Image (cartoon, coloured by chain):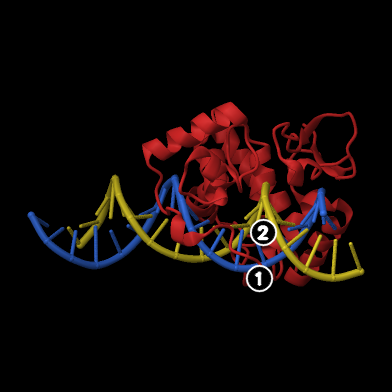
Chain colours: A red, B blue, C yellow
Amino acid sequence: MRKPCCDKRDTNKGAWSKQEDQKLIDYIRKHGEGCWRTLPQAAGLLRCGKSCRLRWINYLRPDLKRGNFAEDEEDLIIKLHALLGNRWSLIAGRLPGRTDNEVKNYWNSHLRRKLLKMGIDPNNHRLNHSIRCSTAQAPYNNASSSATSSTLKVRAPSSLKSHADNEKECGDRISPDEVPDLNLDLAISFPSPSPVKVEKEPNPTKCKAESGSLSAQSPTLLLFR
DNA sequence: AACACTGTCAACCGCGTCTCT
DNA sequence: AAGAGACGCGGTTGACAGTGT
């Protein structure tokens, strides 16, 4: 049985105040990201670590772009979604200054509708195609979307297989080589000194528990342009 | 003006994965 | 090998704003 990530009685929830934001910013500027579990106490925040992490990543990080999505960003999201499904973090990794949450929200509120208006099924990116799989929110995933998404990230070969399996289960879904005019040349392979890597940089300030999580063994999603 | 409806987005939740012991 | 702890991800929720009636 997993313990709750924090003692919920003693933590604030809901919207962040400016003071809380400032505390978090100050702390991370001083000590860097990481060790989210212990950060709230160290920073004097009555929040759980997860909440702090989310607030920082989605809102406070200095490199965030925010604001409206450009047309080319929209295009890229649509194309990447056609290839990757709801792997928002992977998609966001190709959009500098954008977060997975932001991309996901934008997809659900704008792009889905836009595609529907154009007569394209946002689930499989096909024209005038009735939705075959009942999981409208998780186009390429079967029962557990989070499971498959993690699989893709970590174990590329089997994930490709699982994607292919889903294709079978869901009928004639689009496959990467079916995507027209994509020109993304997406490949998954083990790390090598090559093009753009969508990979989290190991944070030097990270604590012990996390430090080995991106070892040389971890396959990396490589994206070429 | 008041209410209902709809859209947006920040935040939460639960679960999978990874690492360490 | 098994269990615990921590992180990260995707799905979902709920508050708020905008729009329509």
Which residue is rendered at x = 90% and y = 33% of the image? A192
Which residue is rendered at x = 66% and y = 59% of the image? A124
The residue wearing badge 2 is: A124
Which residue is rendered at x = 80% and y = 69% of the image? A168
Whichever of labels 1 and 2 marks the residue nearer the N terminus, that label is: 2
Find out whether the residues at labels 1 and 2 contact each other: C-beta distance under 8 Å. yes
A26 or A81, which lies in front?
A26
Disc 2 chain ID = A
How many discs appear? 2
Disc 1 chain ID = A
The residue wearing badge 1 is: A132
Position of C10 with respect to A43 (left or right) is: right
SS label for mark 2: loop
Q: Position of residue B18 (x, y in %)?
A: 81, 51
**Image quarter hosting the N terminus of chain A:** bottom right
Q: CA distance from mark 1 to mark 2?
A: 9 Å
Q: Position of residue A150 (x, y in %)?
A: 74, 55
Which residue is rendered at x = 61% and y = 39% of the image? A75
A73 or B16, which lies in front?
B16
